[in-house]
Image: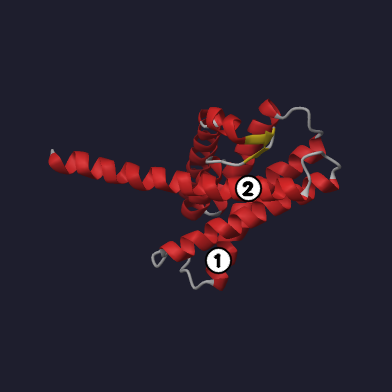
Amino acid sequence: MNRLKTYSFEIAICIVGYVGFFYLTGFINQQFEVNKSVSWLFPPAGLRIFLILIFIYSGAVGLCIASLFINYMSFSDLDNCTMLGVVIISGLAPLLSRLFVIHHFQVDRDLHNLTIRQLVMIIFTFALFSSGLHQLWFMTRGIDSGSWSLFVTMFFGDIFGSIVFIAMIKYGIAYLRRRYVRQ
């Protein structure tokens, strides 16, 4: 029962955090949007990676539920099958990239030996999986968003967004340390 509470709490953190951050950064994304679902800078991609690195499977479930909410509220023009595919890809792509990097680049499951190089590999792999699976799904469903040029845009948008997010975390932690160490 305790385990269920823990997983439920982790999933809730992921849902609230991702939905909130998605809409908070929405005005930034609009400046870099190519179309409604593809942007040259997408900071929520970094949060997806972060949540998966920390919460793993409950992170994937939370991201799927958050993506369902976001897609229902903001992309209601999609049919249910297309929306379900986008939701699954949104939670599955970062999980697949984590598993891929752990398996192929000697990263421990608890991430205690995670290096900058390996983090860059996670970001690159995530961007490849996320943009590739999304664009493949869009092409399969006959949606205008599915194309090679939009794959490239989404790929770089996920990379740039992840770097921006990780920089925000790094410098935010450094700021808090400086502030509270003085006191």
Disc 1 to disc 2, how far (Cα)? 16 Å
Residue 53 in percent (x, y) is at 49, 55
| Left or right: 141, with 63 as reference point | right
Local SS, label 2: helix
Rendered residue at 36%/48% (across/down): 170
Q: Identify the image quadrant of the C terminus.
A: top left
| Residue at the disc numbered 2 | 91
* Crowd tier of the residue under label 2, counting other residues whose Cα lies within 10 Å: few below 14, some 14–19, many 20 or above: many
Rendered residue at 84%/48% (across/down): 140
Rendered residue at 82%/47% (across/down): 139
* Crowd tier of the residue under label 1, counting other residues whose Cα lies within 10 Å: few below 14, some 14–19, many 20 or above: some
When the figure is inspected, residue 106 is found, relative to residue 162, above or below; the finding is: below
Rendered residue at 84%/43% (across/down): 141
Which numbered marker is on residue 101? Answer: 1
Residue 90 in percent (x, y) is at 65, 46
Local SS, label 1: helix
Which of the two labelled residues, at mark 1 and mark 2, occupies the earlier sequence position? 2
Residue 164 in percent (x, y) is at 46, 44
When the figure is inspected, residue 17 is found, relative to residue 103, above or below; the finding is: above
| Residue 150 lies in quadrant | top right
Is residue 45 visible in the rendered structure shown here?
yes
Is residue 134 visible in the rendered structure shown here?
no
Q: Which residue lies furthest to the left in this view?
A: 183
